[in-house]
Amino acid sequence: MSLRSQVSGRLAQLRAAGQLLCVPRPWPGPSAGATRTRSSACGSPGVPGRGQPRLAAPSGSWGLGGGGGGAERSAGVRTWAPLAMAAKVDLSTSTDWKEAKSFLKGLSDKQREEHYFCKDFIRLKKIPTWKETAKGVTTKVEEPKYKKDKQLNEKVSLFRGDITKLEVDAIVNAANSSLLGGGGVDGCIHRAAGPLLTDECRTLQSCETGKAKITGGYRLPAKYVIHTVGPIAHGEPSASQAAELRSCYLSSLDLLLEHRLRSAAFPCISTGVFGYPSEAAAEVVLAALREWLEQHKDKVDRLIICVFLEKDESVYLQRLPHYFPADSPGPTGPRSQL
């Protein structure tokens, strides 16, 4: 066969291949460029996206004008790449925390919702500010520790409920030093977020008391989890334990600023089975939050004190007016008819 005939035959094959690529199909054909794009975004090119339907290549998405040569295939890869990157990652079965974390960062807040472990999540705007809550509080404080600041009262909330269901930028985890999950709030957060959270925590190599480290939130409505290790108290807390507890909150807030996050929810760190008395802890927490907000109030939208027990809620309702004074509630009885 002459050289001219060989070249003509090869061109005919390329044209035929180009026409086939213009037809919608589950994934691009055996083109080397197509395989590389699919593999880089979603793992093995021969495996569907973990229970999700395969994406079809829209007609003309490869930009093939007719020849189907190398330049046209290169253009096709550039056009197809965003579609491949949008391929869905199933967080309930994924074993690659880096892939999952990168995938979630590329989603809008609305798109993230379908990956939450729960459907009854609570949006930030549904959580009353302390300014609103204080209207129903009857505790009277003659000499509060700090001056009234209405702006600060809009930056703080007291919420009783499940911290894992809060849709905020970050929730704080009262972790143990290994960061690998345990009981109480720590265990609840790890179970809700899924095993990818534990996988990332293994890379952090533990955490010292009073310090904090940050990971992704994975299946949580919260985008991030800030892990901090509080002191274990036996009886009356010492001055050093009070300083460590304060450091837990300040270290967590430092990470909030570093990552430009604007909302966070804190559990009752070190109380309960860890022995720190709730009343003493509340004094440390509220002083730390008040003083921090006085310097950084414009950099956050909300800091939420999240309690689970009714007794802890009562403690904070009694102590919050001392640190965040609000307007006194109006009369609740019937008005005089005179």
Image (cartoon, rainbow, N blue to C red):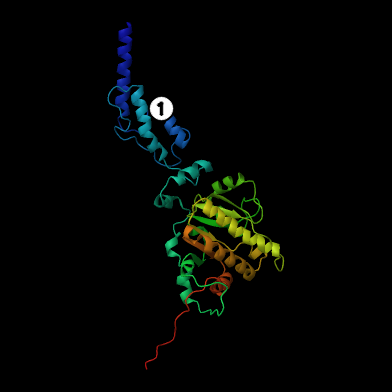
Percent of width and height locating residue 127: 45, 65
| Residue found at the very far top of the displayed protein | 2
The residue at 66%/62% (across/down) is 243
Q: Residues within 10 Å of mark 1 (few under 14, many from 20)?
A: some
Measured from the top left, where is residue 149 in percent x and y? 49, 70
Residue carrying label 1: 33
Q: What's the residue type where badge 1 is placed?
A: Gly
In depth, the one of 322 and 110 nearer the eye is 322
User: In the rendering, at what x and y percent does residue 212 appear?
Assistant: 60, 53
Say whether residue 145 is visible. yes
Towards the viewer: 184 or 147: 147
Q: Nearer the viewer, residue 20 or 320?
A: 320
Residue 307 visible from this viewpoint: no
What secondary structure is marked by label 1? helix
Rendered view: 282 above or below 62: below
- The correct choice, above or below, for 321 with respect to 36 in the image is below
